[in-house]
Image (tube, coloured by chain):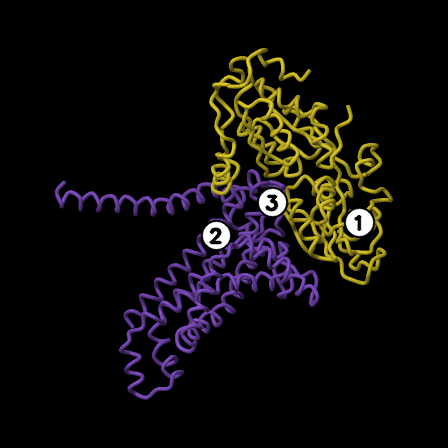
């Protein structure tokens, strides 16, 4: 049984009298806050009011953090809201670091984190909801078959400048890197044992979508993005191709059996003093009931 | 309600509204300043220009905070766009007002007005899909200062053209009649009479367009490649201050975040200087 079902009174169908405010209404406010006040403002939507009224879950949850995790959490939140109509969940992106900072500052109840928690972040509770990997993508017309660890290091440090050196056409490589502070960049750097200054990019992008758009419009570009996002876009006909790394294809199977080298957990983090509503949502997001949503986003459910 | 009373009500309502508008500007300025204080105090203004690079996420000690290359990027893309848009804009305004057949002139003006209403993200997509592949064939990677300059030129062209046109229209009719009575050719009239008379309006148009170019974010973020470096050619990718704020604000914390506010303050200062220049330009020509 889903833990949240415990709070539902039997034989009292629908029609909760709790205060229900639309989650959409805060979007503009949230956007303005983001623009004008950065992370310091934020909305304190989720506090106030008991999480259970008439024996049913009600209230608001604010979730911020990684743009990789956000689409999945958005889907989970939608399903959760359908199940508990008096619950409203706001999902905002802004990156892993912001998710952690917002939870610590009590601006958000839950943070989305697309990497392993660091030792100094042990004050937060961690809930793994999926496993993702980082894929290297090129334009679909790029003939290069695969890249090895050394070739990737060479390309991103600027030692390899032309595709012909790694089995492609005689064209100059456009190296697409992520902006400072993104979890994808951190995983990339730590896996390849590089420092941020060593990478010699020709283009710097923000989120996964911008990376995919950049590669899809430039035949000589190489970028690294979330496998989930890349597979999703590639399945919808975007002109990108995911490259095997060290001979392993970035597929869901390779992620599942752990053979793909560049993986990371997608986590939700919360404070130790979370209320029942937040705990119910966290348990729901980690439960088998949302595994179909996880797979629909081309992620893999976490190993038990 | 007596007539006087209603006048009073209107007067104070309008005063109140004007004050709200003024206060918002002051509040934004004050907010930027307050948020900048931690970075200015802990990092110091000097390091924003003397550090080796821009890697601010390391924190006050380990990070480096040199945003001079981005200020250079902003200046380069803005001045390039203004240099291109000014002759184009003034030229199209002159064409529209003095040379075009009536129907064509009206149609042309409508087109320019339409250009002014296109959202900047659309210009960005256009740059990404059309302009960058063209530049790439010439000089890879395509995302470059040149792409930014061209997109910005098209974006600020309507500002220059429309404001110039309205100042051409404000040239007193008697000047034109005088020129005609002297038997001046059309070009001599434009060059010798109309342009000097409309000078302050044209200068204001160019300065306003410059302000828009400095502040433009989305389109430059999408087409310029965002590498933090001082450009040595127009084919180098560069990052503008505005693009930097948009790229990093969501992710920035502590000193990094505050450093972004410092760059915001710097942008505001640039625009203040521009506005002051435009006021000075129009005052000077009025008393000349």
**Residue A145: x and y, percent?**
85, 52
Residue A152's disc is: 1
Q: List the single residue furthest toward the right.
A: A247
Secondary structure of the residue carrying tag 1 is helix
**Residue A81: x and y, percent?**
58, 26
Secondary structure of the residue carrying tag 3 is helix
Q: Quadrant of the C terminus of chain B?
A: bottom left
The residue at which mark 3 appears reads as B56
| Pointers 3 and 2 in contact (C-beta within 8 Å) | no
Q: List the single residue furthest toward the bottom.
A: B183
The reply, left or right, for residue A135 in relation to residue B27 is right
For mark 1, name the chain: A
Residue A203's disc is: none
Chain A: its colour in the image is yellow
**Residue B263: x and y, percent?**
51, 49
Q: Quadrant of the N terminus of chain B?
A: top left
Viewer-nearest residue: B100 or A161: B100
The residue at which mark 2 appears reads as B266
- Residue under the image location 72 percent in, 24 percent down: A288
Chain B: its colour in the image is purple
- Residue under the image location 71 percent in, 50 percent down: A238
């Amino acid at each position: 049984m889903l833990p949240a079902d415990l709070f539902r009174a039997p034989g009292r169908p629908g029609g909760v009298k709790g205060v229900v405010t639309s989650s959409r209404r805060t979007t503009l406010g949230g956007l303005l806050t983001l623009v004008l006040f950065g992370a310091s403002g934020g909305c304190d939507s989720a506090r106030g009011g008991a999480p259970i009224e008439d024996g049913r879950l009600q209230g608001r949850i604010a979730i911020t953090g990684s743009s990789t995790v956000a689409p999945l959490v958005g889907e989970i939140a939608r399903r959760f809201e359908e199940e508990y109509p008096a619950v409203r969940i706001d999902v905002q992106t802004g990156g892993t670091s912001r998710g952690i900072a917002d939870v610590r500052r009590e601006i958000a109840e839950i943070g989305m984190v697309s990497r392993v928690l660091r030792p100094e972040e042990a004050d937060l509770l961690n809930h793994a909801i999926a496993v993702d990997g980082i894929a290297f993508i090129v334009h679909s017309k790029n003939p290069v078959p695969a890249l090895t660890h050394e070739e990737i290091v060479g390309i991103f440090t600027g030692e390899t400048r032309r595709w012909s050196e790694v089995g492609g056409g005689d064209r100059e490589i456009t190296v697409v890197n992520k902006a400072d502070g993104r979890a994808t960049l951190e995983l990339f750097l730590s896996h390849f044992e590089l420092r941020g200054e060593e990478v010699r990019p020709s283009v710097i992008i923000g989120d996964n979508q911008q990376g995919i758009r950049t590669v899809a419009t430039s035949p000589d570009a190489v970028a690294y993005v979330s496998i989930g996002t890349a597979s999703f876009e590639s399945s919808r006909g975007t002109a990108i191709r995911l490259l095997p790394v060290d001979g392993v294809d970035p597929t869901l199977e390779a992620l599942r059996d752990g053979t793909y080298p560049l993986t990371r957990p997608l986590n939700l983090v919360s404070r130790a003093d979370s209320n029942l509503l937040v705990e119910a949502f966290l348990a729901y997001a980690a439960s088998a009931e949302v595994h179909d949503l996880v797979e629909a986003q081309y992620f893999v459910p976490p190993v038990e | 309600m007596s007539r006087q009373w209603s006048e009073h009500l209107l007067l104070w309502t309008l005063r109140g509204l004007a004050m709200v508008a003024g206060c918002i500007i002051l509040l934004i300025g004050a907010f930027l300043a307050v948020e900048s204080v931690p970075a200015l105090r802990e990092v110091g203004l000097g390091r924003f220009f003397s550090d080796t690079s821009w890697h601010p996420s390391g924190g006050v000690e380990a990070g480096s905070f040199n945003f001079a290359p981005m200020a250079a990027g902003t200046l380069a893309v803005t001045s390039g766009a203004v240099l291109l848009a000014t002759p184009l804009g003034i030229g199209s305004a002159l064409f529209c007002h003095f040379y075009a057949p009536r129907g064509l002139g009206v149609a042309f003006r409508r087109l320019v007005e339409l250009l002014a209403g296109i959202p900047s993200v659309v210009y960005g997509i256009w740059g990404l899909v059309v302009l960058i592949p063209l530049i790439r064939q010439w000089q890879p990677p395509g995302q470059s200062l040149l792409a930014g300059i061209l997109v910005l030129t098209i974006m600020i062209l309507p500002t220059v053209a429309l404001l110039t046109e309205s100042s051409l229209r404000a040239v007193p009719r008697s000047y034109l009649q005088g020129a005609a009575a002297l038997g001046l050719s059309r070009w001599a009239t434009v060059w010798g009479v109309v342009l000097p008379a409309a000078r302050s309006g044209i200068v204001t148009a160019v300065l306003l367009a410059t302000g828009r170019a400095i502040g433009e974010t989305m389109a430059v973020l999408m087409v310029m490649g965002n590498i933090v470096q001082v450009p040595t050619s127009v084919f180098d990718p560069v990052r503008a201050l505005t693009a930097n704020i948009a790229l990093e604000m969501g992710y920035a914390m502590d000193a990094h975040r505050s450093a972004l506010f410092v760059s915001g303050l710097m942008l505001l200062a640039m625009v203040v200087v521009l506005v002051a220049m435009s006021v000075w330009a129009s005052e000077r020509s009025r008393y000349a």
